[in-house]
Amino acid sequence: MKASVLLKSSLLTSLFVISSCATTKYTEDTSKNDYSNLQAGRMYTVKMKDGSKSQKMLFRNIDGDNLIGTAGKKDSTEVIIPKADVAAVRDNKKAAITTGAVVIGAAGVAAIVLSSSRAD
């Protein structure tokens, strides 16, 4: 009985971890990339292809081959990132929600495992 509960709990935990991806990947060929899923007024973390530091930006719009936004909600410094330099874009709000769901799910799985081990 213990093995089946442990197996189920590890399966649930791995399911939560796998589903926690909140990143949109982009290919080397910039003509194939679709940036239409980016929403104006949302915070994004943009990972660069050259491995330099990721940039956080409050996305505003797309102008030709550039992503345009500001450095933050309170910081109005304009940020312009060429599409050719973008490796991935992560929506900060979705990432926070997914992380919270993983923590809650892991706590639930731990509670099931503890209660089943004490029942014996």
Image (tube, rainbow, N blue to C red):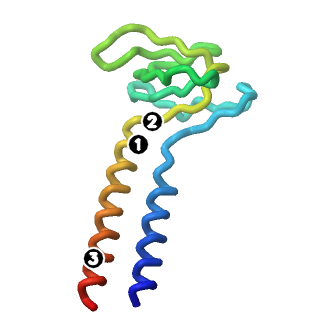
**Residue 4 occupies which quadrant of the picture?**
bottom left
x and y, in percent, of residue 72 in the image = 35, 19
Asked if disc 2 and disc 1 are in contact, CB closer than 8 Å, the reply is yes
* Label 3 vs 2, first from the N-terminus: 2
Badge 3 amino acid: Leu
x 24%, y 84%: residue: 118
Q: Which residue is mark 2?
A: 91
Q: Quick check: 51 above or below 116? A: above
**Residue sitting farthest toward the top:** 77
* Label 3 vs 1, first from the N-terminus: 1
Q: Secondary structure beneath disc 3? A: helix
**Residue 42 occupies which quadrant of the picture?**
top left
Report, in whole angstroms, how far the alpha carbon at label 2 lies from the one at label 1.
Answer: 6 Å
Q: Which residue is mark 3?
A: 114
Label 3 Cα neighbours within 10 Å, binned few <14 / some 14-19 / many ≥20? few
| Horizontal side, residue 32 vs residue 37: left or right | right
| Horizontal side, residue 36 vs residue 78: left or right | right
Label 2 Cα neighbours within 10 Å, binned few <14 / some 14-19 / many ≥20? some
Q: Which residue is mark 1?
A: 94
Q: Secondary structure beneath disc 2? A: strand
Quarter of the image that includes the C terminus: bottom left
